[in-house]
Image: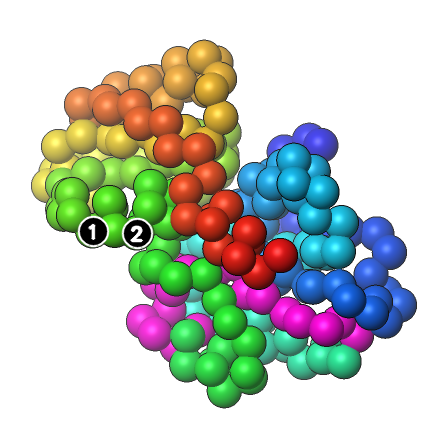
Amino acid sequence: MTDLPSDTTLTERGFAEPAKGRILLIACGALAREILALKRANGWDHMVLQCLPAKYHLYPDKITQAVEETVRENRGAFDDIFVVYADCGTGGLLQAKCAELGVEMVAGPHCYSFFEGNDTFAARDEITAFYLTDFLVKQFDAFVWKPMGLDRHPELRDMIFGNYTKLVYQAQVNDPALEAKARDCAARLGLDYEYRFTGYGDLKTALAARA
């Protein structure tokens, strides 16, 4: 599977028809590769993935409405619907909407937390760390460098990242090429670099519990 562009909505084939016993996963497009890998590794064929555009990572105000619309569109076609988003900058609005709709979601403030494990992440209390996942390392220019204007105004670096001390790469897979790119991202931002292999963290736990 190739990397998905930021405006891609991904849906697995074969879920248009009502699917008895199946679970619909409504997820951030930035998690598509990881969720598909977990499905394959664990034989979770009854879980069907629909991803909303990964670019909502940049516009969290769009997430709650998009999730609500997707839940309502698929209500009745599946035995269960699970939202594979954490709060992701919605300020509790997504959790409130999921409760209203009667669907559950992944616990945690954001994917950086649940990849590392919510308890472990909270215990670190790292307020000066900037985090990248596999997806964000691959899409660094599209999701960090250009949206923040650093490609046009490099002087913004100190304004935006002046209070950060390090870049933490939370790796979901062991990939030397990605680690090299993450090191380069840290250098471009003028930050110290730290590598952490997290694997899938609480994402795997949440999906296993749902399966």
Q: Where is residue 53 shown, x and y percent of the image?
A: 59, 55
Q: Where is residue 16 shown, x and y percent of the image?
A: 85, 65
* The residue stretch that appears in magenta: 77-94
- Locate residue 190: give its quadrant: top left
The label number, if any, that marks residue 122 in the structure image: 1
For residue 182, side relative to residue 162 (left or right): right
How dense is the environment of label 1, judged by Cα within 10 Å: few (below 14), some, or many (20 and up)?
some
Q: Where is residue 66 shown, x and y percent of the image?
A: 58, 70
Q: Where is residue 64 shown, x and y percent of the image?
A: 49, 73
Q: Residue at x 79, y 74 (%)?
A: 77
Q: Nearer the viewer, residue 99 or 165?
A: 99
Task: Please say if 180 is above or below 3.
Answer: above
Task: Please say if 41 is above or below 99.
Answer: above
Q: Residue at x 71, y 42 (%)?
A: 43
Measure the C-alpha gap from mark 1 to mark 2: 6 Å
Q: Residue at x 64, y 75 (%)?
A: 71
Which quadrant holds the C terminus? bottom right
Question: Is there any visible trace of residue 141 in the rendered image?
Answer: no
For residue 210, side relative to residue 198 (left or right): right
Which quadrant holds the N terminus? top right
| Residue farthest along the bottom direction in this orientation | 100
Magenta residue check for 167:
no
The reply to whether the C-beta atoms of the residues labelled 1 and 2 are less than 8 Å apart is yes
How dense is the environment of label 2, judged by Cα within 10 Å: few (below 14), some, or many (20 and up)?
some
Q: Which residue is mark 2?
A: 118
Q: Nearer the viewer, residue 22 or 73?
A: 22
In the rendered structure, which amino acid carries the disc numbered 2? Asn
